[in-house]
Amino acid sequence: MSGIVGFIGKRNALPILLDCLDTLDYRGYDSAGIAISDESVIHIRKTVGRIDDLRAVVNRDPVTTGILGIGHTRWATHGIPSEANSHPLLGCDDRFIVVHNGIIENYPQLKRNLQKQGHTFATETDTEVIPHLLEEYDTGDFEKTVQVVLPMLAGSFALAIMSKAQPDTIIAVSQNNPLVLGRDKADLYFASDIPAMLPFTRQFYPIQNGEYAVLTQGHVTIKKFADGSEVCPIWRLADESLEDVLLNGYEHYMRKEIFDQPKALRDTLAGRLTEDGVELAELAAAWDAGLFARVRKIDIVASGTSYHAGLIGKKALEQLLHFPVAAAYSSEFVHEHANLDETNLVILLSQSGETADTLSALREAQKYGCPTIAITNTAGSTIARKADCTLLTKAGPELAVASTKAYTTQIAAMLLLAVWTAQRMSSLQPTQVADLLAALRQLPTDVESTLIMIDEAIDQFAQMTYDQESLFLIGRGLDYVLALEGALKLQEIAYIHADAYAAGEMKHGTMALITPGMPVIALATQMGSVFDKTVSNIKEVKARDAFVVGITTVSDDVLADEVDEVMYIPETHPFLMPVLAAIPLQLLAYYAGTVRGHDVDRPRNLAKSLTVE
């Protein structure tokens, strides 16, 4: 949940590290630090707060120009945000300098043993055991010492290590936690995520689990820490471009990413929609090899927003395949799943492809022989590498902590998967999904229309939420799933106590919370009998003097008479209404957050890539 950067080259490392940390602070922003070397002396600066606070520290207390260094931006897991707990961390005699992302699960035992050997600890972190271990087992050779210590560490970790005895070298380590190398001629970089390095290079190699990289001037060697054998890296060009990580005139990344959604959806659908169906080349080989031949049940596993996308995919898979489909939170699935075997297909959704809970669920599924499909936005991520098959969404980098375009592209990918699987598993005729395929082709344009239609109206409504501490969202069926996602967005961005309820359940207890003026957002985008029932539930809420804002389709002429305000969005296939109806809820969270003065890109207590359980 923290971010690591590193550089070694011919240029001044300080501005490069600070710029990389700026881009990477969506991974953590309660403290930050750097270590800079001029190849003879290593200088350390760190502070509580954001990267701008670190810049201020460096301005007050400059460091000598150095050509290599490491940096860190932290999301606290062990120990409160404080200067002492900030990385880089050192041991007793400052011999080794370490930054770390992840969890050292056996640190209590390691710490007790080191204290018995006379080591004194200065922080509350699990990370601090690492520099002390390096001191305790120092062989006199930097790389050999790291090789000795790594097998002692249990858990998930990415590390960058420097040695005062060898200040011209950096060692970077990855174990179940992402760390990516970048290179541009003689300059070498590494970071927890590719976007941090895009201003400097587009050539990358993700360090694989159980590998470490030794970086010196103009040279990098990659080895396995199990046996020290050398690895020949296959460098690849990033799909992302520098434009993808610039604000391009937007005030916040969240707003930019909301308005990126038409392009993100076009890119996700491109090459996959044919005239009479769906082609997913990424899955075809596994299908032909019989990987899914015995599947009779599907489990969808994800966390947070990805879980909500999975719930929509669950509905589509159930209706098209006529299979039992279950959806579970990743953190619950590992401990509470039903019987698993090769007849269970497990679909895992993760924007980053590094979500620790979802990775644990993947390992659990594979332990029982389940075929697995990953849906992720990040090529080369751990989930993408470890699952049997990967279906990439193509949303581009998502730098705001709250997920928007990743969510809608995950829904699109789930629907593509549902149609593709149904075509192959159940003699589905193209005419049975003709309307859905047509709606998918039209979806990016419909999203553009929705953005134009509701942007200003949502801004005005958000002003009314300024002094509200609570808000309800209600809906039925897929509208209820959407209400869950809308509530989550308002919680994480506007810090409003927003709750989602199945509209028909309000009368079974929750109606007691409705007071005069209470804001209620009523989602009524699913037509037919569900719509009629939702209108009845809205009347019940209005009878208790709630202030109701309805969201419905342009074809509806009923809801306006039942609510205080109504917002219209285009009408599309029922499976895709949650994509279009997500737009006003995303914008509401954005505007409600900004009107309250919150940092909508970096909400308090949260981080983007959750690499600890």
Image (cartoon, rainbow, N blue to C red):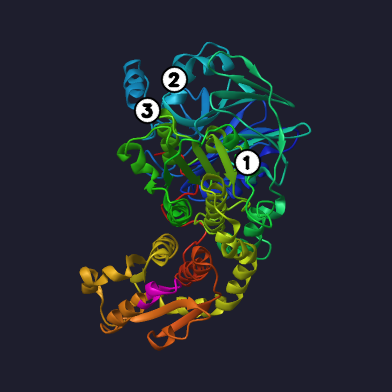
Q: Which of 272 and 289 is in front in this view?
A: 289
Could you classify mark 2 by the number of other residues whose Cα lies within 10 Å: few (under 14), some (14-19), or many (20 or more)? Answer: many
Q: Where is residue 18 in the image (x, y as percent from the top left)?
A: 62, 45
Q: Nearer the viewer, mark 2 or mark 3?
A: 2
Please name the residue that numbered disc 3 is placed on.
121
Residue type at mark 3?
Phe
Secondary structure under tag 3 reads loop
Q: Quadrant of residue 311?
A: bottom left
Q: Locate residue 372, reporting x and y percent.
A: 49, 37
Nearer to us in this view, 476 or 473: 476
Query: In x, y percent, where is residue 344?
Result: 42, 38
Left or right of 125: which side holds 513?
A: left
The kind of residue tagged 2 is: Leu
- Mark nearest the camera among 1 and 2 is 1
Tell me which label, 2 or 3, sits earlier in the chain.
Answer: 3
Q: Do the residues labelled 2 and 3 touch (CB within 8 Å)?
A: no
CA–CA distance between discs 1 and 2?
A: 44 Å
Q: In this view, does 75 lie above or below 112?
A: below
* Furthest residue toward top: 139
Residue nearest the viewer, comparing 535 with 207 = 535
Q: How far apart are marks 3 and 1 (CA)?
A: 50 Å
- Where residue 113 sits: x, y (%)? 33, 18
User: Is residue 524 a member of the stretch shown in magenta?
Assistant: yes
Highlighted range, magenta: 521-532
Residue annotated with mark 2: 133
Counting residues from the N terminus, which is met first, the one under dot 1 or under dot 2?
2
Which residue carries the number 1 mark? Answer: 282
> Is residue 531 found inside the magenta-colored segment of the image?
yes
